Amino acid sequence: MTHYRLQIPSFNQYKFAWAELTQEATISKEFPQCPKCNRAMGQRYWLPPHDIILKQPKKVGDFVGGVIGTDLIVSQRFKDKYQESDMSGISKFIELNVVQMGTSKNTPYPIPKLFGAAVETVNTKVDYDKMGVSWFSKPKKNNCDLCCPGGGGDGGIYQTYEKVVLKQETLTQNDFFIPINFTGNIMVTERAKEFIDRNQFTNVQLTPDFDAKHDIFKVD
C-alpha cells in the first residue's frame, strides 16, 4: 500500500494565503511527550485565543500554510466534508480567529472561517535505514526505541532523505497520521488521498512515499 506525505506549498508560491501568529500569541512551554520515555516531541502547545493574521489573502485555499502551533489549518469546507466522512486521524478542530487580512485591518476580502486541525501522532514508525538518510546530527546510541531515531536531540536530525519508508508492522488504521519518530510530517493513506482528490481541496501536495525526497536546506 502506498502512503503519501501531505504538505502545504510554501508561502512563496504567491497563489494562496498563508497564516501567521499575532504578536500577542501565547505558546506554552510544554510539549507533547513520548508515552515511553517522556521525551518532548513536535511543537509546543498554542494557548487561546487562537488569533491569526492571513497574509496574501486574496485567495484562501482549503489548506493554509503557516507554522502556528497547529498541525494543519483547514477551511470550513474541509472540516465539514471530513466530519461527514468516515476518515480517521484528526482528533479535533479548533476555530481560529482571523483578526487581520494582509497588511491592513481594513480589507476588501471576506474573512474566511478557518480551523486548526490536530492530527494524531501514532506509534507507526519510519525506517530510516531504508530511506537513504544523511544525518545533520547523528542519533546517539541507547535512545528510546519508540520515538527515536529522528526528532532532534539524542534522536538525531536528518538532513536529507530519498524516500519515506514506513515499518509495515507498526501501521495503524488512521487515514491521517504523524509517525512517532517522524514528527512534523503528516502521512495519509490511499483512502485519504482519494478523499482529498474527490473533493478537489486546494493548496495541498500529496507525494507518494517512494518519491518523497527532502533536504532541510531546500524548500519543498
Image: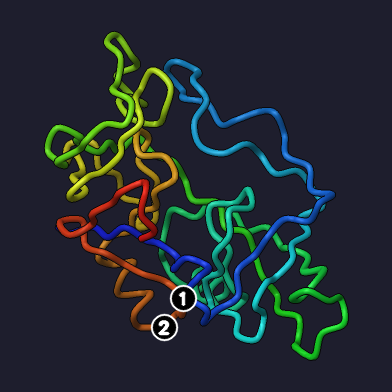
Left or right, residue 208 beside residue 200: left
- Alpha-carbon neighbours of circle 1 within 10 Å: few (<14), some, or many (≥20)? some
Q: Where does the image place residue 118, in percent across and percent down from the top left? A: 55, 51
Disc number at residue 199?
2
Residue type for callout 2:
Asn
Distance from Cα at disc 2 to Cα at disc 1:
12 Å
Q: On screen, 191 above or below 104?
A: above
Could you say where residue 67 lies in the image, as x and y percent from the top left? 58, 53
Estimate how packed mark 2 is, as few (under 14), some (14 to 19) or many (20 or more) residues with alpha carbons within 10 Å: few
Identify which amino acid the numbered label 1 is placed on: Asn
Residue sitting at the far top: 142
Decide: is 74 above or below 144.
below
Pointer 1: what residue?
203
- Spot occupied by residue 55 in the image (x, y as percentages of width and height): 67, 72
Provide the secondary structure element on which disc 2 rests: helix
Answer above or below: position of 113 versus 115. Answer: below
Q: Residue at x 41, y 66 (%)?
A: 86
Q: Going 36% across and 26% down the picture, which residue do you hit?
A: 147
Q: Which mark is residue 35?
A: none
Disc 2 vs disc 1: Cβ atoms closer than 8 Å?
no
Q: Residue at (57%, 75%) from the top-left corner?
A: 80
Element on which disc 1 rests: loop
